[in-house]
Amino acid sequence: MDNKRVVQKALNLTWSTEMKSRSVQSRMSDYQSSAISRLIYDIFGGEILKTHLHKGWHFYNRIDGERLDFTVSERNRTLADIQFEDIPAAYEEANLYYQEEDYSNLFLMFVRTFENLVGLESYRRRRAV
């Protein structure tokens, strides 16, 4: 996957905005990994995979043979030491931890943030001229 750093930055910005807007923080790690794995799948393709952790399933992606877990960051060291099982997950499994409306909002926020980071808006204006 190209632009992993840009994707990670857009996700971090989107997620911090999403967290501020959510009133309930219960099972947030389930919500985060499942929603982000679906988001990456919906936009970039690949597969959704899962690994069992002591608190339940952790979802992530594989694109072009490369495992991508955008929920693991330098700040989140507990997930960095995961022994990944790479179990294929059904698309529907990732949808069990959030409401469709929440996902739609997350999706739109991510797309806007990603576009701002890569400058797609200015690119569109130049092409229209």
Image: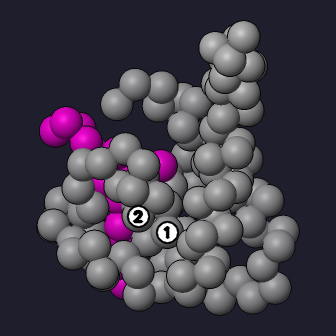
Do tag 2 and tag 1 residues touch (Cβ < 8 Å)? yes
- Residue 29, placed above or below residue 123: below
Residue 39 % position (x, y): 46, 58
Disc 1 designates what residue?
Answer: 35
Placement of the N terminus among the 4 image quadrants: top left
Locate residue 18: give its quadrant: bottom right
Q: Residue at x 68, y 17 (%)?
A: 128
State the SS at label 2: helix
Report whether 42 appears left or right of 76.
Answer: left
Residue 92 % position (x, y): 30, 81
Report whether 20 appears left or right of 3.
Answer: right
Q: From the image, give the main secondary structure of the stretch colored magenta.
A: strand
Q: Answer few, some or many: residues within 10 Å of disc 2's Cα (few below 14, many 20 plus, some between 14 and 19).
A: many
Between 109 and 3, the one nearer to me in the picture: 109
Tell me the amino acid under the disc marked 1.
Ala
Q: Tell me where the magenta segment starts and ends, as one range.
A: 54-70
In the picture, the disc for residue 46 is: none
Number of residue marks: 2
